[in-house]
Image (cartoon, rainbow, N blue to C red):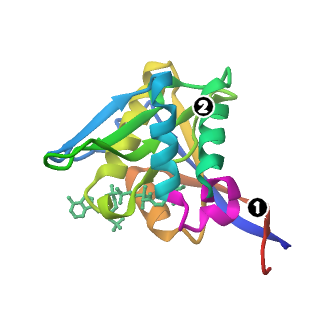
Amino acid sequence: MGLVYFKRYRMELDLSEPLFAAPRLPLGYELVPWSEGLCREHASAKFQSFHCELDANVFPCLGRRDGCVRLMREISRRTSFVPEATWLLRYRPPESRPQAVGTVQGLQVEGWGAIQNLGVVQPHRGHGLGTILMARAAAGFRRAGLTKMHLEVTTDNTAAVRLYRRMGFRQARTVFKAAEVSGA
Ligand SMILES: CC(C)(COP(=O)(O)OP(=O)(O)OC[C@H]1O[C@@H](n2cnc3c(N)ncnc32)[C@H](O)[C@@H]1OP(=O)(O)O)[C@@H](O)C(=O)NCCC(=O)NCCS
């Protein structure tokens, strides 16, 4: 194991301005507002979205099913948790049970809406679902009375950085996150 520093951007969005446009939810998908009974479904969507991705190196808990369950419990029990900004995305395949395919969670940190993990499971990407989840989170922060939101994204995660820029997020500063990585 070795210590690696991952370069990340803090990106910010002004919620008092008109929000970015999100596409319509495609057929077969459903957005579900937060309730405690959804913790495992959020964790499942989180694990499936992140376990093969860069951020599983930055936050090793994202690479493990049990790690995602613990993280989801920990986020949702914080006093700073913002349920209005926390959304689950389900897909119902024809004649089959609904599956959790996307998640976003929100906290309130020092007057900011803070996005935790936005994730969409690989086969469902590129249809606007990440944008839709983020639009719901932003609207939820607004309902909770917040006028600004932020997130952190690993700079090498170019697809996510591009997406956030398109939504109107601006890069506020660069931060470094240390993580133990095997083989480093
Ligand atoms: C980042 C992430 C959430 C984006 O999810 P997504 O559902 O693919 O997002 P969208 O579909 O809204 O946008 C992705 C791209 O599809 C395009 N798109 C959106 N709707 C589309 C449609 N109907 N047809 C074609 N393309 C479309 C978007 O314009 C965007 O294009 P770009 O790659 O040029 O930026 C997803 O890639 C993910 O889960 N990654 C792994 C986890 C992660 O890194 N999360 C971010 C942590 S900060």
Q: Which residue is mark 2?
A: 107
Q: Nearer the viewer, residue 124 or 94?
A: 94
Q: Nearer the viewer, residue 24 or 61?
A: 61
Rendered position, 169 above or below 58? above
Q: Which secondary structure type mostly characterizes the magenta part of the structure?
A: helix
**Which residue is located at x 62 percent, y 32 percent?**
73
In what quadrant does ligand 1 lie? bottom left
Q: Position of residue 27 (x, y in %)?
A: 14, 45
Give the image quarter of residue 138.
Answer: top left
Q: CA gap, disc 1 to disc 2? A: 21 Å
Q: Report the side of 18 relative to 5 (left or right).
A: left
Sequence-first tag of 1 and 2: 2
Residue that sits furthest to the right in the current view: 2
Q: Report if the beta carbon of the residue with label 1 is closer than 8 angstroms to ligand 1.
A: no
Q: Nearer the viewer, residue 5 or 12?
A: 5
Which disc is residue 176 wearing? 1
Q: Which residues are magenta?
A: 50-63
Q: Please say whether residue 55 is one of the residues in the magenta stretch.
A: yes
Per the image, label 2 sits on a secondary structure element best described as strand
